[in-house]
Image (cartoon, grey):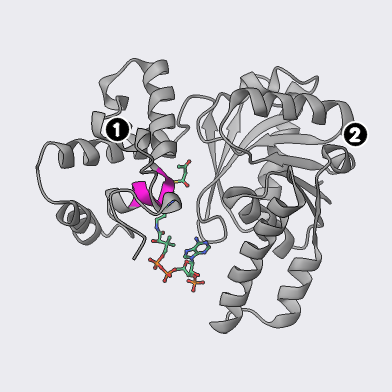
Amino acid sequence: MIKKVGIVGCGQMGSGIAQVSAAAGYPVISQEVSEELFEKGLRNITRLLDRAIEKGKLDSPTKDKTLGNISGTTELADLADCDIVIEAVTEDMTTKKEIFQELDKVCKPETIFASNTSSLPIGDLAAVTNRRHQFIGLHFFNPVPIMKLVELVRTLDSSEETISTAKEFAESVGKRVVMAKDTPGFIVNVLLVPYLLDAIRQYENGLATRDDIDSGMQLGCGHPMGPLTLTDFIGLDTILYIADIMFEEFKDSHYAAPPLLRRMVNAGYLGKKSKRGFYDYNK
Ligand code: CAA
């Protein structure tokens, strides 16, 4: 049973996971490489809670209780007594492996390890630890407090006990859990990313304007965002990264990144986070 949650990384995904875990009543320790980055993540959480208060969806004591459940550290060793540690750092295999090797040394033997990676093989991360049976993928979606889904990724070695404990935990923070195999893109990205790549390809080929492609899918299919807006929201670099991993694995043109996407990423057009993608966010 999960009583205490450790989260590595307090960026967009890590802070979101910290927020929903703390709101569900878990004490959370959030590890970042610097105090400034932890404070930045905490400010993000505070801003979202304040917005919820303004809308009358939350009261002040609940906000204080949620924030009171979150503490920060720069040391992985401070996560030693957590029952689950969820890693949500940048999508870099070497960095993630180093983190899990370190966590494996410092955490109690029962601690379950989870990665929030959207594209890297969970089994490869598990293999650097001595607790492959207690290792799963827990893939949350952005924005974490709003998106109801978690993909629970089972490796060849994940034990049934680990899966059921992790499922119970994800449900307790308000998420619907779907079970996915440890293959690139899991369920959602293997379907979503080719759709986004196709939208970019059609835009590049001149099928329609940017706004009409987005309006077409938003209004014609009832999607909350059109594909080019969604690509900006997720990050062009993230979509390219996932596409390249899937193409490498499946060698299928479905997953091939259109030249425009690569060119935009190389030029620093990363979407909303760099204030410039298919749309301009400087205004
Ligand atoms: N963080 C937290 N909450 C946010 C938010 C953010 N960045 N942006 C908006 N919200 C909240 C708002 O506070 C609001 O909350 P309430 O309903 O409680 O009031 C709610 O979301 C709706 O917000 P808005 O009315 O301002 O705007 P909207 O109706 O346009 O919704 C959206 C914004 C929720 C982001 C919506 O456009 C949406 O669902 N877009 C699609 C998002 C999506 O597909 N995410 C998955 C990406 S794929 C992924 O994450 C996996 C991967 O590996 C790449």
Judged left or right of residue 200, residue 145 is right
Residue 231: in magenta span? yes
Judged left or right of residue 44, residue 228 is left
Q: Residue at x 25, y 30 (%)?
A: 258
Judged left or right of residue 220, residue 207 is left
> x, y (%) of residue 276?
35, 51
> x, y (%) of residue 134?
75, 29
Q: Nearer the viewer, residue 281 or 210?
A: 281
Residue for badge 2: 108
Residue for badge 1: 263
Comparing marks 1 and 2, which lies closer to the viewer? 1
Q: Quadrant of ligand 1?
A: bottom left
Residue 60: in magenta span? no
> Is residue 71 depicted above or below 96 in this figure?
below
For marks 1 and 2, the one nearer the N-term is: 2
Secondary structure predominantly adopted by residues drawn in magenta: helix
Tell me the quadrant of the picture where the C terminus can be found: bottom left
> x, y (%) of residue 207?
9, 43
Which amino acid type is marked by label 2? Lys
Q: Residue at x 44, y 35 (%)?
A: 187
Report, in whole angstroms, how far the alpha carbon at label 1 lies from the one at label 2.
46 Å
| Mark 2 crowdedness (10 Å alpha carbons): few <14, some 14-19, many ≥20 | some
Q: Which residue is drawn at 57% across and 60% down?
A: 145
Q: Is residue 109 visible?
A: no
For the magenta stretch, what is the residue range? 230-235
> x, y (%) of residue 203?
17, 42
Q: Nearer the viewer, residue 237 or 78?
A: 237
Q: Which of 109 and 243 is in front in this view?
A: 243
Q: What element carries label 1?
A: helix
> Is residue 216 depicted above or below 57 in this figure?
above
